[in-house]
Structures are given as C-alpha cells and as structure tokens.
Amino acid sequence: MKIHQLSLFAENKPGHIAAPVRLLAQESIDIRALYLADTQQYGILRMLVSDWQKAAGVLEARGFVVKVTEVLAVEVPDRPGGLADVLGALDGAGINIEYMYAFPYSRGDQAILIFRFADPDAAIWCLQAAGINLLAGEELLKN
Amino acid sequence: MNSILETAVVECHPASVPDYTPVAELRDLQLKRLRAVVTRAWQQVEHFRSRLADRGLTPGDIRSLEDIAKLPFTVKSDLRDTYPFGLFASVMKDVVRLHASSGTTGKPIVVAYTQEDIDVWTSVLVRCFAGCGLHRGDIIQIAYGYGLFTGGLGAHYGAEGLGATVVPTSVGHADRQIMLMKDFGVTAMCCTPTYFLHLIERAAELGVDMKELPLRAGVFGAEPWTESMRKHIESMSRIEAFDIYGLSEIIGPGVGCECRQHDGLHIFEDHFYPEIVDPATGEPLPNGTEGELVLTTLSKQAMPMIRYRTRDITMILPGRCACGRTIRRIDRIGRRSDDMLIIRGINVFPSQVESALLQIEGTLPHYQILLTREHGLDQMEVQVEVTPHMFNDKIGALQGLHERLQSALDHVLGIRVKVSLVEAYTIERSQGKAKRVIDRRTS
C-alpha cells in the first residue's frame, strides 16, 4: 500500500535538477512522477521511479543526499470534484496531510494523487472506509 | 577504561621519565636551561642581543624563572625580517636540517636543527606517542605532509624512536591510505583531524568499515579541533583520538600532547617553557586564565626562540593530571588570535561558527565562511552542506533547520550573517589543513 518515494536536496541553481535526472536516465530508471518543492535558495526534488532501491543506490554513490519516504497513491476519477471528495474524507477524520501532488494516469481517465501523511496507517484506514482506491506501488510504477 | 597499572605498564618507555620529574627539580632544570639558552642567543644572535641592549639587559639579569617576563617577545615577523638565517645561533656546518613554513604571504619562515635538536625533537615525540599508549609493535601510518612542513618528518622520527613500525604515506591519495591501513593492519594514524574525517568519509564510500580495522589510536594535530569532532571520530571508528600540539618555530609537532586522561595537553616543559600572556598587553596571566601561549625553547641549539608569541589562545590548567605526570598541561586550543576575522568591526572566530553549527546538528557538517564586500559593507556567508542526517523531505522542516542555524549563528556571533544550505560534497575537502574561510574582500 505504501510507496517508496525518493527525495533529493538541490540548490536552486541552473543545472542542479538535470544532473540527478541524467544519472537515472543512464541507468535506465524511469521517472514515473516528479514534483519540485522549492524556496528561493534550495528545493526538494521528489520522485517516484521504476526501481527505487537501484535509483537510491546510484544517486548516493554519486554523493547526492537522498531520503526515502513512504507515501500513499490514491486513484481518483479525472473530473471536477474528484480531489474534493478525497480531501473531504480526510478532513472528516481529522487526518493531517504533510504534502501532496497530483498527476494524470497514463491509462484511462483516472488521476493519481500522491500524499505524505504524518500518520499513514490512519489515512489508509480512513480512505478505505470511504471506498477510495489506494494503489499498490508495483501497479503504479511498473511500465 | 584501563586500570592505572595497565596504563603504567604501557607507558613505561624510558623516554617518558622526564614527564615525572619532581616539580622542584624541574624548576631548577628549567632555570638552568633558561639561563643557558638566553646566554647562547645573546652571544650568537645579533637580533636578540640588540633587543636586550634596548632594554638595558644582559643574560646575568635572569636570576629566577619569573625574570623571564623581563625578556622581549619574539613574533613571527622577526623570523620574516631576518629571513633566511638571521636568527640562527649555530654555524651552518652544525645545522643538519632546515624546514620552512608554506608562508601565505611572501617569504616562508625558516627553522633549523642541529643533530642535538633533532634528538630532542625525536625524544619529545616518543613521549607523545608513549603517552598515547603506543609502543614497539604498533604500526603507525604518518599521513602528515612530508617535506618542508615539520609534521611528516617530525612524527616519522618520533614513531621510529618509539620502536614502532612506520608507514610513511604522507598526505593525499585517500584510497591508497585506506588500502594500506587495511592491508598492513595499521594500529595508529597521525594526520590532521580534518584529513582523518575525509578518510572516514572515503572509507564509507569504498565500503570499508573503519570499525573492523585494527586501528586503535589517532594522533591528530596541526590545526585546532573540538571535542565534538573527537566524539564523531571515535563513534565512526574504534580509535582513541589524541590531540597533539606543536609549531615549527618552536620545534614542530611534539611541543605538547594529551595523555590517556584526555584532560589537556602536557607540555614537555623541560624543553619548552610555557607562559600565558594577555594578547593585548603582553602581561603574564596566572594559571587557569585564558590568554595567548608564549613559549621559550630551553634546549634548542640551532635556533633558540625566546618568548615566542604563538597566537594560540589557551590556558595553563591548574592542578596535577590524574596520570601522575608532573609537567603542566594547557587546555585544548580552540582558536588562534590571528584566526580572528573582523567583520563590520566585530571580532569573529571561525571556531564560534563551528560551535553554533554543533549546537544545532550535534555533529559538524562541512562548512565554509565566505567574506565579500558589497557597497563598502562586509558580508559574511556561512555555507553549510546538507548531510543525510540533516535532510528532511518536508520543505518546512528544511526551512526550520535553516532558521535554527541562522538564529544560532546570529546569537553566537552577534552579527547578521547569511546562511546557505548547499548540496553535499560541494565544499572542497581538505587534503591537509581545513580551508574554512574564503575572504574575497578587497581592501
């Protein structure tokens, strides 16, 4: 249920995102989703990749500071109100979202929401109780 | 912890006997040697003779150890002004070795040794190593630079004098250093503490676990380092880390060293007489008061140094060390009076930046101080590398860290500085001494 996400520290300077991304390309690791959280000075590059263990190893060997965190992937219909329903279920249960990002699913008319929760187990229980579909890591990340 | 008995057995090297001289006897020896060295410098060194004449002094005016305070100080510029051989008290045919500092501006500082000086130097290093619990049978890798710098050859002769097996790698080539440590079963390392940190990092990258090596002692010097660095080094390896002190102008490494009590550095004061003075006024300060360390070589032949201002800030520790040595101790040196940066008129020491970073992180990340001048105003930036330990993938947590670093630095330094979080490995790693400050201010 929980998906391994890689986060990288990057300075907010030209070329600083390209280097790790190029490295993953050389190793034929596919980036399935990517999100950049940034401030004026630095940012955090968050990625879901096809092989997180290999990717973390490759990046760390090149001196990148990598953090692996567990996130949840929620499938919602790609239509107005899709996200609002999910958030409504979480709000109702008082579940705190640390951060989230969304991307369209390459198959069909679904969108994928990636969440990091302070208490992922409570979130899983709440979402399942509301009948919302959670994706397993393999399903989402494999080609 | 070793029992006292075990420690005594390990440390019973014959060279260490002077460490335990009864105090009254030690003072008598010091006075006798002080009078001899002052006489020698007065007879042989024109520069010193004229300085005494300016004060209306002759060597006969030194009747007690306290009279040392009557003598003029020697400062680094005296060595520069008399370059290359102006302070020598021996003729060149009696000089068996010359060393020189790398001198950041202009001409280097030259120092000279007779065979007798080399023998004294070796003996004090043997006393250092013996005090660290090392002995014949140890395999000691010397990763201080060999050459004009006194670190490599000084430690080398001392380790040989001890009867240990010496691996003279000099500095650099980290991968080879690690390979030899492992393949030769090295039991002790001598290098700068920052170079050892570099080796720890590199060993981890190479998949070598320092904790599985037979390495049990590290003798680290040539730059100031902190208790937190000691804890870090000792947690990443099985070594006991010792602080060794010295400077070329006096003899090189081996002026003082920690014993296994790690409660200050014993000064081999039968050869190097320590005083603490107020750095501003030059007035002597009592034991237990922090000031600038001033050293007088009591037995040096080729180049006696009388009341040399080291610029190192420390104190003479009151009381006797639990190890039983009678020779006095100085506190670990945290800063040098000439490390001081003046930023917008405020005095700042790099060690203050270090202590602020340690407060926040617990371990010391790599950092660099960058000084620039914008619109006539000094700007200070502290760049801190983000380590895996510090990194959190929530932007708020990183901003929180940034703010904590900012406020700790503002608080410790008393001036506003810019704190930048930078990527790992972007600050240049030191092969020898740490380059902590880049000053791009043009005056």
Image (cartoon, rainbow, N blue to C red):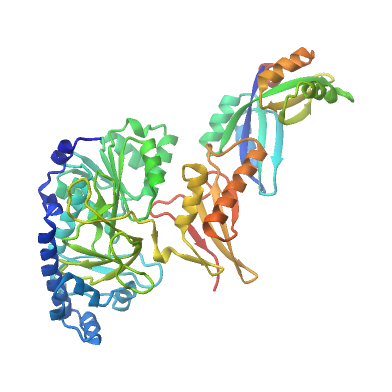
Can residue A78 be seen here? no
Question: Along the horizontal axis of the image, is B19 left or right of B437?
Answer: left
Q: Where residue B384 sits: x, y (%)?
A: 54, 49
Quadrant of the rendering where the N terminus of chain A is positioned: top right
| Total numbered labels placed on residues in the image | 0
Question: Along the horizontal axis of the image, is B304 left or right of A105?
Answer: left
**Residue at screen point 58% across, 38% down:** B391
Of B436 and A64, the residue lying toward us = B436
Of B169 and A79, the residue lying toward us = A79
Q: Where residue B215 sits: x, y (%)?
A: 29, 37
| Residue A77 image-quadrant placement | top right
Of B284 and B125, the residue lying toward us = B284
Q: Where residue A59 sits: x, y (%)?
A: 56, 34
**Residue at screen point 79% across, 14% down:** A130
| Residue B372 image-quadrant placement | bottom right
In this view, B217 is above or below A93: below
Q: Where residue B22 sits: x, y (%)?
A: 11, 55
In this view, B388 is above or below B144: above
**Residue at screen point 40% across, 67% down:** B104
Outermost right residue: A80
In this view, B432 is above or below A133: below
